[in-house]
Image (spheres, grey):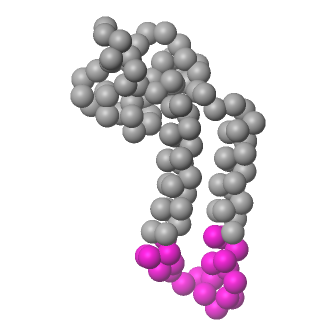
Amino acid sequence: MTRETETTFCKGDIRLGSGCGKCRRCLDQIAAGHKPPDRERASSITNRRFSEWAGRMAVRAAGWASDTLTLPEAVNKPMPADQVARFIADMRGMLDAMEVASHE
């Protein structure tokens, strides 16, 4: 296996071995027919940093949830598609930033 192939995968999760197999980078490499290297690696995100990210995401999600329940008459109405799309984009943006940080 070449050194170039090894560096195309993420640092992975120590429990799963090298290359997490879940992130966009790893899935692209697997789809291209590459196999992750055999050695185990850990994410470069510390437990503290992970907790900070997860906490921020929880606060944002809670904010979205409370904002949607502000008007009692709107509680049982369907969510507008554009608001759902904005929520998904907001959460995805945070997850993408976290994924990039885990590969550094």
Left of 27 or right of it: where is 95? right
Residue 26, given in percent of the width and then of the height, sits at 39, 30
Residue at the image position 50 percent from the left and 54 percent from the top: 92
Where, quadrant-wise, is the N terminus in this rendering?
top left
* Magenta-drawn stretch contains 74: yes
Could you say which is closer to the camera, residue 25 or residue 65? Answer: 25
Instruction: Check the image and name the residue furthest to the bottom.
Output: 73
Image coords of residue 66 (percent x, y) = 70, 74
Q: Residue at x 54, y 84 (%)?
A: 77
Q: Relative to 71, say whether 79 is above or below.
A: above
**59 lies left or right of 4:** right
Residue at horizontal 51%, vertical 24%? 11
Residue at (68% x, 39% y) in the render: 50
Give residue 45's quadrant in the image.
Answer: top right
Residue 87 screen position, x and y as percent: 53, 66
- Tell me: residue 22, above or below residue 59: above
Q: Is residue 76 inside the magenta stretch?
A: yes
Query: Which one is in front, 82 or 98?
Result: 98
Residue 15 visible: no
Q: In the picture shown, does residue 62 fall above or below 4? A: below
Question: Can residue 14 be seen in this snapshot?
Answer: yes
Q: Which residues are magenta?
A: 64-84
